Amino acid sequence: MPRRKIVPHRLSVAALVVASSLLSSLLMAQEKQSAKVLELDHVSICGPDLDALQKAFADAGMTPDLGGPHGNGVTQMALVGFEDQSYIELISPIKPGVTEGSDWAKFMSADAGNCAWAVSTNVLLQDVDRLKKAGITVGEPKRGSRKRPDGMSLEWITAQVGPGTPGSVLPFSIEDQTPRVWRVQPSDSMKGAPVFGIESVIVGVNDLNTGIALFRKAYGWAEPLTETQKDFGKLAYFPGEPVILAAPANGGWLSDRLGHFGEGPVAFLLGTRDFPGTLKKYKLNNTKTWFGQKVTWFDPAKLKGARLGVIGQ
């Protein structure tokens, strides 16, 4: 099965300046286990009303495409597809208030916003075996499906990795059983847009060192770069990988979020090759710097509470 074209992560450019200092750590990690490079498949935003989520994203300049109901008979989705073939999934119950039977029931009912992330693979069973050998808890592979509005049925296999709900701290893995292009295409609203895809998932954790140790154990990565941001707390970034860990420094919204929903995705960052053009198109401001890269955020109040930002040079 052909793989989608991987767009290099922008944060890895900034990390080049410290490559020499990380080399020894990287070599040590690779002696224990070959480092695994993650390929983001999609991220999920949960809510009780799909129409409301679609309108919020359309108003922000990212009009979603209706994706159809899942085979579980409980949830339905719409998606914002990007040129790198990653996508944002907007997921809600088919029947208002009826969420039982979905792994993300509590997130939809509570209008949680950011709720899951997934990485794609062509060798799911091999990945499951490798993770188990690394001492990571992995669920039994499960089949899933979705029926598009045009009647076409899509099928895949997923495996939950690590604790919590699927795609909470560690991403769940997904392998297509039908062509991936059936599952996602760039949305018309994103063709030619200054943002090209999902760059990073911000995973909220209670303790930064514990979170770092879990990812290094699962994927054989070297020590991350760290810094502190006022709005998010203590951050850890693994150069070249699509994940940043965030742990509360002094209370705040992140501490409240973790207390209510537990550890998991708290924000997503889109990548851009044209940061000024992104600011202009989406009317964004209040730029900050994360790990040497410019970062700006959409107003969460306008995205039904979801936290979505853009990172680039």
Image (cartoon, rainbow, N blue to C red):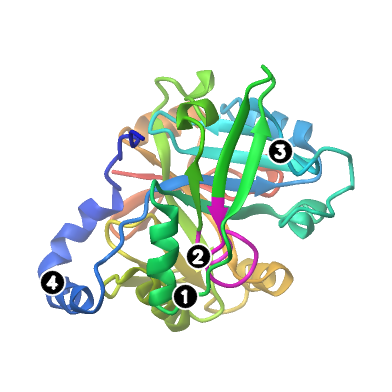
- 36 vs 92, left or right, is left
Kindly identify which residue carries mark 2.
Answer: 170
Question: Residue 253 in the image: x percent, y percent?
Answer: 64, 66
Q: CA distance from mark 2 to mark 4?
A: 25 Å
Report the mark closest to the observer, 1 or 4. 1
Q: Is residue 117 visible?
A: yes
What kind of element bears circle 2?
loop
Kindly identify which residue carries mark 3.
Answer: 70
Q: Earlier in the sequence, mark 1 or mark 3?
A: 3
Type of amino acid at the residue the image marks with label 4: Leu
Residue drawn at point x = 69 percent, y = 21 percent: 149
- 285 vs 293, left or right, is right
Report the mark closest to the observer, 3 or 2. 3
Q: Is residue 193 above or below residue 227?
A: above
Q: Is residue 300 visible?
A: no
Decide: few, some or many residues near mark 2? Use Cα within 10 Å; few <14, some 14-19, many ≥20.
many
Tell me whether the residue at label 1 lies in contact with that at label 2, contact meaning CB atoms closer than 8 angstroms.
yes
Type of amino acid at the residue the image marks with label 3: His
Q: CA distance from mark 1 to mark 3?
A: 28 Å
Magenta range is 158-171
Q: Is residue 197 above or below residue 46?
A: above
Tell me whether the residue at label 2 lies in contact with that at label 4, contact meaning CB atoms closer than 8 angstroms.
no
Q: Earlier in the sequence, mark 3 or mark 2?
A: 3
Answer with the quarter of the image where residue 228 lies. bottom left
Kindly identify which residue carries mark 1.
Answer: 136
Which quadrant is the C terminus positioned in? top left
Which quadrant is the N terminus positioned in? top left
Type of amino acid at the residue the image marks with label 1: Ile
Tell me whether the residue at label 1 lies in contact with that at label 4, contact meaning CB atoms closer than 8 angstroms.
no
Label of residue 23 in the image: 4
